[in-house]
Amino acid sequence: MGDEGADAPPTRTREDDVGKVYLVGSGPGDPDLLTVRAARLIESADVVLHDKLPGPEILGQIPAEKREDVGKRAGGEWTPQEYTNRRLVELAREGNSVVRLKGGDPFVFGRGGEEAEHLADAGIPFEVVPGVTSAIAGPAVAGVPVTHRDYASSVSFVTGHEDPTKDESAVDWDALAATGGTIVVLMGVGKLPAYAAELRAAGLDGDTPVALVERATWPDMRVATGTLDTIVDVRDDAGIEPPAITVIGDVAATRDRVVAFLENGESAPVGAGGREEPESEAESESDSTPESEGESESESTPESEPDRGENA
Ligand code: SAH
């Protein structure tokens, strides 16, 4: 401010003005599963940048005037990650307190890592607020513990978005099958036939229990169960769509033993035995190709970004 006259209004440098970015996990969608810190920050934020994954209940509680949707845009295209990165920096430099709200935990298949790097490169102060990841909460609310002293001593979290038959798959399904532990697949509705086959070929038993948890903790959550051999039909009959978690392993059978007394979620379970007729709407949508419409790989290019709020 050295060369300003005494009468000039005080001007501040960008550094003085710079706000802060909070990379916040929303949990799987039930507002009661927001952390206390997430709820406080959403309340006090100037701007909340979000996509669809935090779900209708949480997003519905945020005043429209402070929300910016960086998920699907009108016309069906996805906001490029570069835009979101730029917008975070821009808003912070204007002095705003910015919440970047992501489904589940911001650092689990959520591009939170990329955004953190970008903010650091731009010199923007930021904080990470962990969230309850759908990778654990999804199975849990369906009555499936991801580990169990008797059946599963390890758990792997993997993306199902990749094509397992492609040469350079980053997911080693053979190695996963060999762990003998639980496999939890995110973004795994569309490619289910491919990785189910891959796991069978790797030696997993066709009777291995599998559960699909769709929109976990949302008001319209559904659960469908089967085995490695039946789960693709189960998915199709029930019209399971993203966002959904696939949990593979003996733990998935635990649901059957506890479901009678399990009071999570209001929706009727969709099970291999007494499956409900799918709603016609869901059924017709299952004819579409989920991989192109609903699923995203966190490394994918913006052009191939997901639909239906699947990606964070
Ligand atoms: N950061 C998120 C995951 C983002 S990747 C987290 O920690 O939960 C997007 C994938 O997450 C979806 O394709 C789906 O597999 C899963 N997912 C997120 N929220 C979900 C929910 N409420 N129910 C079921 N699956 C969910």
Image (tube, rainbow, N blue to C red):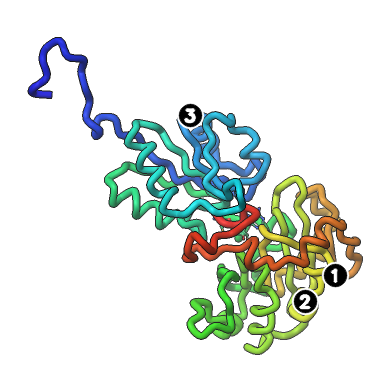
Residue 84 appears in the rendering: yes
Of label 2 and label 1, which has the lower sequence position? 2
Q: Position of residue 186 (x, y in %)?
A: 60, 64
Marker disc for residue 309: none
50 is higher (above) or lower (below) than 185? above
* Three-letter residue code for mark 1: Ala
- How crowded is the residue under tag 2: few (<14 C-alpha within 10 Å), some, or many (20+)? many
- Do the residues under discs 2 and 1 have CB atoms within 8 angstroms? yes
Of label 1 and label 3, which has the lower sequence position? 3
The residue identified by callout 1 is: 272
Q: Quadrant of ligand 1?
A: bottom right
The residue identified by callout 2 is: 227
Q: Quadrant of residue 254?
A: bottom right
Nearest the viewer among 145 and 196 is 196
Q: Position of residue 57 (x, y in %)?
A: 67, 39
Residue under the point 46% across and 39% down: 99
Disc 2 on helix, strand or loop? strand
Give the Cα distance between marks 2 and 1. Answer: 9 Å
Is 236 placed left or right of 38 in the picture? right
